Image (tube, grey):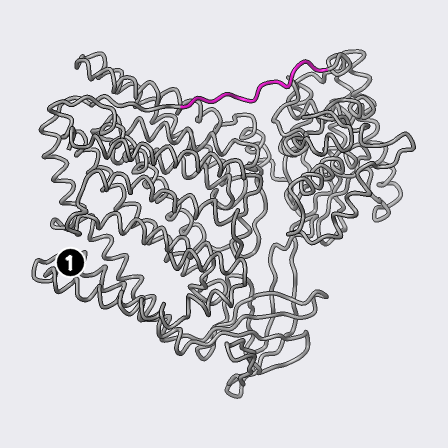
């Protein structure tokens, strides 16, 4: 509770207040001391050493070592900053302490030769920032380079690239000196991993004991037990309704639209196929993946070729009734021209000027929606004026910028600037002519002329035909949406088969279950293939933003179903359905499926391991969440039968094994994140809200898995109930922190999900009712 309160104190009063009141308070340090004593007493009171419970011995001893390392860091570690301008030297370390700012003289001198800010091609987004240093130490001069995830280590001091001066002529390095604390803590991490490995292989470990119990319980049952469970379906985006006759009459043929969709375009620092660009534009402006029955390429090319027609189409999404009423606008979708008066003045401008003069945290939801509406209008404005499509590379630009035909083309030679303007206009003219004549050969040729110019002037080799083809194919396959539907159908049918086997075991039902399992396996490999394609296209592991993480959680959930559902059709069916639900959530409008560039701090190999492991834990916790609901439903609604207690016990054991696996992965992933933080910016724990809630989740699930040790709490009902409500800590860690709090993990922020939390609250209220009903009727089953 104290940790949770501290994260909100940080939001309201600042990080320093949270540290002084909670994290670094004497009471909190005393509680950690009691925790260490508890670990030590448990080892002896339960005779873990004499009973050769080596997994528990190693894990508890590792936790003591980790806390000892944290204490050493707190007492003796140093953190600060060094600021150097190009051509200057310094030996001063500036530290911010509870007693104010103080400086310390370093045992060497740093000299900044050069600082470089490297941006993604054609954008202002930083790709990397680097400092070339000369280190004057022990009578000699050494050259060194510091950049994000590349650390300078000298005489126990570690220097990390933290920031830079606005004029890009100076660097800011964060400094850490914690040799003893880091060594002790890392030793604890390694010992903890060793203990986790022992859990799964030592014959007398808790996990292996549960495996043996599961085999014994399965001897007493032959068929699944009747459940009451609700499944949900999904639907693809439906057309908005009939398009206007003018749009229908000027429909771009899909064949040429696909040809247009392969044209390379530079956007947000990436070179991508036009199909990716058009998809993002349509989602941003229209909030859908298609306009009626026009795909995104047909929509974009038609808009570019016939802007006047599209200015009158109800195209711009608007979900705020207050804005609609204020400006007398249609609800849901509005035409571009409705936002301008008869004199051509932008109707939203006066109100927007007022809003932008107000601090961001003081703006109402309606005002924030008005800003988003303005963004959509600006996108269309740029498209109508041909200033957004970066399709013409400048061979002489050191930043490798590609220009749109409506941009200022003075950087080009006169001949090239004329060609750029004329070639694009010629292409759109040929498109309009082809709509009348039906002959698209000249439009195809005009597109080839543009592609030839791109190829001849792409001096930085940004056009990667293999990646462009892969991205175009990835967009067209739409694998995750297809897999989503497959998971719903196959998981639902498998659940029905499991239920019908209650009425009698027949051969065809067993074969049907095997057949559906094969289908799920094929869908699972399609899921993997889609993630692999995304990895190849982006160049980094596909779990670096909210959308990718949801896709990965879905994969991990289905994997967990395979791991613990080898002999439990029910577990496999629930995992598959839940995987479909997660993909369904990932496909909602507030999730951005766009492949983006990475901020520098995320370019670390530790990130891949940290996120992969910690998010995989969510899948196992999800399985436990569903199994807990299933058991509570059995207790509440199922009719008493002789095999019913066996079924509840079987599912509870699987639930417990899944929780243990989740705790191991969650803990390992959290400490991998600590290593990443220490190797990237010099501290392995900073009480950031995301870190704190990850720790809270570990504590919550550790309590659930240790219930059997407390006399009076060793109850199947209580265990299953808490395995359900513990999932709330995961939801808070994954979604709630980004929405309710703030911190260093804000680069993973998800917007527009306020309604989701309302549904989550309703769901947990219903689960609370289920818990009460199951408690009253539990005696009939257990």
> Is the residue marked by circle 1 packed among few (<14), some (14-19), or many (20+) residues within 10 Å?
some
Q: Residue at x 17, y 13 (%)?
A: 504
Quarter of the C terminus within the rendering: top left
Residue found farthest to the right: 343
Secondary structure type for disc 1: helix
Q: In this view, does 258 lie above or below 622?
A: above
- In the image, is residue 467 part of the stretch drawn in magenta? no
Q: In which quarter of the image is residue 300?
A: top right
Span shown in magenta: 232-243
Q: In this view, does 128 lie to the left or right of 484?
A: right
Magenta stretch: dominant secondary structure: loop
Which is more toward the observer, 702 or 86? 702
Question: Where residue 462 sits in the image (x, y, percent)?
Answer: 64, 44
Q: In this view, does 334 lie above or below 736?
A: above
Residue annotated with mark 1 = 54
Residue found farthest to the front: 776
Q: Which residue is drawn at 69% across and 39% down?
A: 372
């Amino acid at each position: 509770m104290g940790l949770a309160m501290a994260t909100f104190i940080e939001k309201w009063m600042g990080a320093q207040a949270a540290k002084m009141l909670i994290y670094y308070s004497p009471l909190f340090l005393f509680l950690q001391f009691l925790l260490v004593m508890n670990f030590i007493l448990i080892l002896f009171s339960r005779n873990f050493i004499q009973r050769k419970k080596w997994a528990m011995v190693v894990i508890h001893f590792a936790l003591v070592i980790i806390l000892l390392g944290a204490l050493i860091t707190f007492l003796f570690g140093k953190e600060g900053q060094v600021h150097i301008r190009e051509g200057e030297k310094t030996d001063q370390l500036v530290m911010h302490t509870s007693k104010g700012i103080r400086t310390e003289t370093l045992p060497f001198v740093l000299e900044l030769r050069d600082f470089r800010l490297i941006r993604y091609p054609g954008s202002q987004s930083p790709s990397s920032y680097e400092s070339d240093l000369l280190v004057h130490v022990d009578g000699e001069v050494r050259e060194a380079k510091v950049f994000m995830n590349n650390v300078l280590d000298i005489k126990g001091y570690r220097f990390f690239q933290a920031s830079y001066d606005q004029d890009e002529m100076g660097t800011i390095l964060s400094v850490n000196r914690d040799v003893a604390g880091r060594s002790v803590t890392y030793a604890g991490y390694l010992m903890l991993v060793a203990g986790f490995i022992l859990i799964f292989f030592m014959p007398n470990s808790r996990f292996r004991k549960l495996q043996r119990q599961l085999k014994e319980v399965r001897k007493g049952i032959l068929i699944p037990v009747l459940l009451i469970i609700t499944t949900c379906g999904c639907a693809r985006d439906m057309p908005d309704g009939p398009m206007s006759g003018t749009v229908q009459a000027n429909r771009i043929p899909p064949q040429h639209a696909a040809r247009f969709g392969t044209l390379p375009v530079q956007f947000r620092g990436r070179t991508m196929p036009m199909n990716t660009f058009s998809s993002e534009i349509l989602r941003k402006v229209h909030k859908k993946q298609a306009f009626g029955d026009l795909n995104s390429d047909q929509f974009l090319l038609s808009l570019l070729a016939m802007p006047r027609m599209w200015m009158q189409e109800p195209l711009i999404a608007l979900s705020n009734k207050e804005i609609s009423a204020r400006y007398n606008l249609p609800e849901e979708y509005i035409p571009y021209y409705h936002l301008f008066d008869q004199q051509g003045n932008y109707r939203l401008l006066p109100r927007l000027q007022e809003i932008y003069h107000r601090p961001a945290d003081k703006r109402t939801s309606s005002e924030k929606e008005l800003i988003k509406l303005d963004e959509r209008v600006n996108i269309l404005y740029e498209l109508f004026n041909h200033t957004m499509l970066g399709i013409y590379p400048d061979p002489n630009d050191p930043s490798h910028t590609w220009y749109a035909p409506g941009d200022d083309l003075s950087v080009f030679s006169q001949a090239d600037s004329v060609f750029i303007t004329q070639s694009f206009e010629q292409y759109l003219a040929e498109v309009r002519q082809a709509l009348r004549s039906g002959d698209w050969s000249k439009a195809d040729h005009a597109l080839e002329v543009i592609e030839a110019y791109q190829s001849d002037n792409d001096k930085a080799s940004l056009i990667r035909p293999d990646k462009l083809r892969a991205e175009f194919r990835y967009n067209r396959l739409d694998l995750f949406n297809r897999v989503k539907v497959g998971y719903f159908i196959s998981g639902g049918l498998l659940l029905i088969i499991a239920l019908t086997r209650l009425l009698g075991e027949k051969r065809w039902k067993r074969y049907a279950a095997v057949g559906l399992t094969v289908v799920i396996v094929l869908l699972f490999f399609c899921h993997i293939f889609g993630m692999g394609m995304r990895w190849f296209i982006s160049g980094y592991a596909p779990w670096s933003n909210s959308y990718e993480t949801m896709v990965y959680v879905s994969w991990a959930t289905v994997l967990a179903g395979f791991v613990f559902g080898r002999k439990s059709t029910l577990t496999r069916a629930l995992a598959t359905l839940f995987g479909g639900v997660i993909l369904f959530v990932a496909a909602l409008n507030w999730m951005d499926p766009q492949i983006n560039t990475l901020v520098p701090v995320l370019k670390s190999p530790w990130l891949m391991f940290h996120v992969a492991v910690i998010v995989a834990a969510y899948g196992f916790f999800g399985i436990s969440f569903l199994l807990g609901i299933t058991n509570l439903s059995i207790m509440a609604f199922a009719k008493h039968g002789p095999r019913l207690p066996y079924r509840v016990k079987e599912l509870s054991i699987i639930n417990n094994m899944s929780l243990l696996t989740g705790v191991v992965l969650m803990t390992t992933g959290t400490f991998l994140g600590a290593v990443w933080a220490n190797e990237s910016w010099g501290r392995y724990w900073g009480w950031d809200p995301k870190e704190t809630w990850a720790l809270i989740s570990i504590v919550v699930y550790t309590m659930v898995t240790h219930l059997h040790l407390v006399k009076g709490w060793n109850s199947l009902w209580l265990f299953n109930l808490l395995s359900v409500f513990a999932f709330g800590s995961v939801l808070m860690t994954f979604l709630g922190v980004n929405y309710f709090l703030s911190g260093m993990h804000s680069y993973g922020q998800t917007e527009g999900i306020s309604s989701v939390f309302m549904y989550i609250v309703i769901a947990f209220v219903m689960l609370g009712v289920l818990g009460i009903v199951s408690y009253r009727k539990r005696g009939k089953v257990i």
